[in-house]
Amino acid sequence: MTERITRPYNFSAGPAAMPVEVLQQAAADMLNWQGSGMGVMEMSHRGKAFMSIIESAERDLRELLAVPPHFRILFMQGGGLAENAIVPLNLSRGGAVDFVITGSWSQKSAEEARKYANVHIAASNEGQAHTTLPAPATWRLSSDAQYVHLCSNETIHGVEFHALPDLNALGCQAPLVIDFSSHVASRPVDWSRVGLAFGGAQKNLGPAGLTLVVVREDLLGHALKACPTAFDYKTVADNASMFNTPPTYAIYVAGLTFQWLKRQTEGDLSGVAAMERRNIAKAALLYDFIDSSQLYLNTVDKACRSRMNIPFFLRDESRNEAFLAGAQAAGLLQLKGHKSLGGMRASIYNAMPLEGVQALVDHMRQFEKTQA
């Protein structure tokens, strides 16, 4: 699928833009997947056709993210919000869990976990309006925590851990749980520092409906009795994500995205490493313009600015609607900021090309000139 298609640039935080090649392939397969006479949505999830799809998707994802053999890849449902309950149901054993609060999503995670565990806030950036990250050396970790939870990229506030903390170096033996929903596959993962990673697919991997969980095998088999069977990680793992009917079409499209990612190159790099180099360049282009501007402002500490979700503000907020109207006319979609934060937000996930970010910068520059 090499045909070049011109589309508007979609900066939605999620569900988000997808690679055109993936959409083209899904369209071509819609009525008849590889001569089977069926679309993927019509297949038995236990038939040979779909089994080949899910097995390929898992194999490609393991390769892309360099997931070690002692981790299990689970395709689940419920999204990241449901995982805020499913994780403590599986890992807390009803005891203490530590949370690092860095924005709205980690706050939601902690509140949900309180229903199942004794939540301790080990660190928080709330006093800094979620614009920086608390240094790991300052975290007040519990001696009896069953796990430590953090959101490694906060979609709303635009802060990102560019390196995951080494809990062992902090004297903590608890596994690290990361919500990597909004930057999964945008950069490599250091699995030596992670016990479990989870994320909704609808930002960087595919359509809404699929949830990815990557969990270390020794963390399986400890679910609370109250945990629904379909959400028990061991049950899901033992049944190869097929205990209940999985989100078949979302898995199929995610699998196409994994194949697209494997084909990506950037200089001498390929796959996720290539995407990381590309994402660094895209983010630098937009941040550099914002920092040089007299009209636009980003308040996040430069040391932890997200490469995926870039909130920014007009210093004269009375011009917000005019800015958005102009962006819409220029084919730059869904730039309005989250309702809790206001302003603007550009989400520049893997599927956003450098040309899309350049088009946004061009609009921002032209709009600023009209305000002089």
Image (spheres, grey):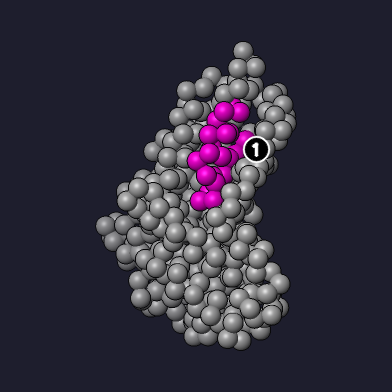
Q: Nearer the viewer, residue 112 or 186?
A: 186
Magenta stretch encompasses residue 361: yes
Numbered range of the magenta stretch: 344-364
Look at 44% across and 73% down and name the residue there: 59
Magenta stretch encompasses residue 291: no
Q: Position of residue 282 (x, y in %)?
A: 47, 40
Q: Residues within 10 Å of mark 1 (few under 14, many from 20)?
A: many
In the orientation shown, which residue stands out farthest toward the top? 372
56 above or below 120? below
Q: Position of residue 298 (x, y in %)?
A: 52, 31
SS class, disc 1: strand
Q: Position of residue 221 (x, y in %)?
A: 46, 82
In the orientation shown, which residue stands out farthest toward the front? 3
Look at 38% across and 56% down and name the residue there: 270
Residue of label 1: 332
**Which quarter of the rendered picture does the N terminus lie within?**
bottom right
Q: Position of residue 332 (x, y in %)?
A: 65, 38
> Can residue 336 be seen at all in this image of the molecule?
no
Q: Nearer the viewer, residue 366 or 7?
A: 7
- Identity of the amino acid at label 1? Leu
Look at 57% across and 24% down and name the residue there: 365
67 sits to left or right of 306: left
Look at 58% across and 70% down and name the residue there: 251
372 above or below 285? above
55 above or below 184? below
279 sits to left or right of 13: left
**Which quarter of the rendered picture does the C terminus lie within?**
top right
Figure quadrant of residue 50 = bottom right
> Can residue 70 be seen at all in this image of the molecule?
yes
368 above or below 303? above
